[in-house]
Amino acid sequence: MWRDAHGAAATTVMAALAAAIVAGCGGGGGGSGSNTVTTPPATPPVVAGSFADSTVYSSAGNASLAAPNESAAVIASSIQLKGQAFNYTATTGHLTAVDVKTGQPTVSFFYVAYTVASSASRPLIFFYNGGPGSASTYLHLGSFGPRRLVSTLPSAAIPPVQLVDNQETLLPNADLVFVDAVGTGYTQAIAPNTNADFWGVDKDAAAFRDFVQRYVTVNKREASPKFLFGESYGAPRTAVLANLLETAGVQIDGLILQSAIMDYNSNCGVLDPGAVSCEGYLPTYALTSAYHQRAAAVPVEAVRTFAAGSYRTAIAAYLASQVAPPAAVLGQLSGLTGLSTLTWQQNFNMQPGYYQQNAVSGQLLGRYDARVIAPNDSALTRDGDPSLTVVNASFASSIVSYLAGELRYTAASAYAPFIDIINRWNFSHDGKQLPDTIPDLAAALTLNPAMKILAINGYHDLATPFHQTELDLARLDASPAIVLKYYASGHMTYLDDTSRRAQQTDLINFLNSVTVSH
């Protein structure tokens, strides 16, 4: 039996969750299941605005800070954008979240804010990864900050570590705040609270609410259009957080759901085999098989129609009473994926892990990006996901050197880009053992009908498949507030150069559509 962070006995379904959950989702989870920490760097030369933090931070569940500080490194910086210098301020340090009910400090949040000295009404975006257990490292150094790590996905070659000026940064369009969850990075609970007190859906979101409110107040950003950008588990966090903020009177203008898992109860990669239909994965299987030339390319709309039609009817009968799959449906599945009809007959409700291991004989597909492929038993498959192994080490090592070398912030303790807390996370929410956050989105939209939502999806994501996100969001009755965008990429869509450029355009259009009406 698996036990949650509060020691309560959980069901066997939850045990399966612990094994199959979207671990480190969108944040470079430690594929080996162990915590990832980094060695504190050598102290760089002291320059104006730098900060050497003497506080020792810990990611342990029982850890807490007795005396948090709110000091920060504040550095004037510049990058080259389209051949021109673009100036900004980088602020790196901690901010104390204060409980809205008790007025007591709860968490010392570590954050990096990039701001442009122009107006207190500039749009403001809060970024965070998921896991649970991931710091914001991937979004911070891979997506739309001013600097990014070079990535060569979908190549399986590990590129040299290289940090470059990010031509797709959103900084000309908005101020950016990257914040780490409790126990990750340098974020820690404040006594008498401990880190583990915040390792659950509701407590985690409440702490983020308190951070956002405090940041807005301290930096006088009440007039700014505000956006929440959550990746993977960060997406359901965003739904709960948006509802909490709107309830607290903080208007949120836009939500960006990157590779979302909004309802854990509908994702067949989370639950026991046979518990729920894998319909949401079929389009990802078809597009990925076509990419690897194991099947003919088929329009994605045709796969959606098949999944919602004959497959949905057949899988419902199969799950209910093991009714044998119709031969015609098996034939279609074989044609879409290149896997034999016998394979589909034996795995009619095919789990993503099975597809990942069997779609290409002798090879393992990436879970986060199924375009990445490596021979079984090779170094790239040692952690079960070659697409993560290719990039994970460079992100984990680069964040600390970047903080110290460019942002001029050093700490006396190790930075934690990922901590393995899946088995300790309290996933219960709103009366369910696993979170379904579509009602939270609905509640937030009711409180603020002007709020808009952008859902970002990678066609080759085997962790949070795009079609399952479509099915989940469809429960909001085709709300005009919701826009879905798709890219020929994986979970971290922005690690693909072509997709990142397209995503930047879509994000700018989204920001403009919201701020024009603000």
Image (cartoon, rainbow, N blue to C red):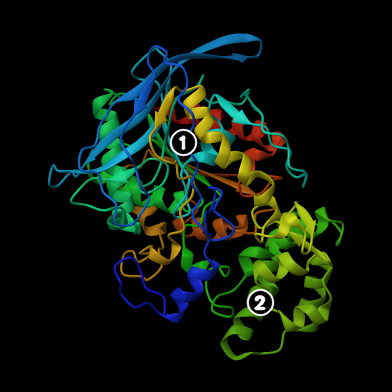
Residue at the top extreme of this rendering: 84
Q: Of helix, strand and loop, which one carries label 2?
A: loop
Tell me where residue 127 appears, x and y as whole percent: 45, 38
User: 373 left or right of 462?
Assistant: right
Tell me where residue 194 appears, x and y as whole percent: 26, 53
Q: Which amino acid, by three-letter code, is at mark 1? A: Pro
User: 281 left or right of 320?
Assistant: right
Residue at the front extreme of this rendering: 42
* Number of marks drawn: 2
Q: Which residue is mark 2?
A: 349
Which of discs 2 and 1 lies nearer the camera? The answer is 1
Residue at x 54% of width, y 77% of height: 272
Q: Tell me the quarter of the picture where residue 242 sits.
A: top left
Q: Which numbered circle lies on residue 211?
A: none
Q: Which amino acid, by three-letter code, is at mark 2? A: Asn
Tell me where residue 388 appears, x and y as whole percent: 65, 51
Q: Which residue is mark 1?
A: 40
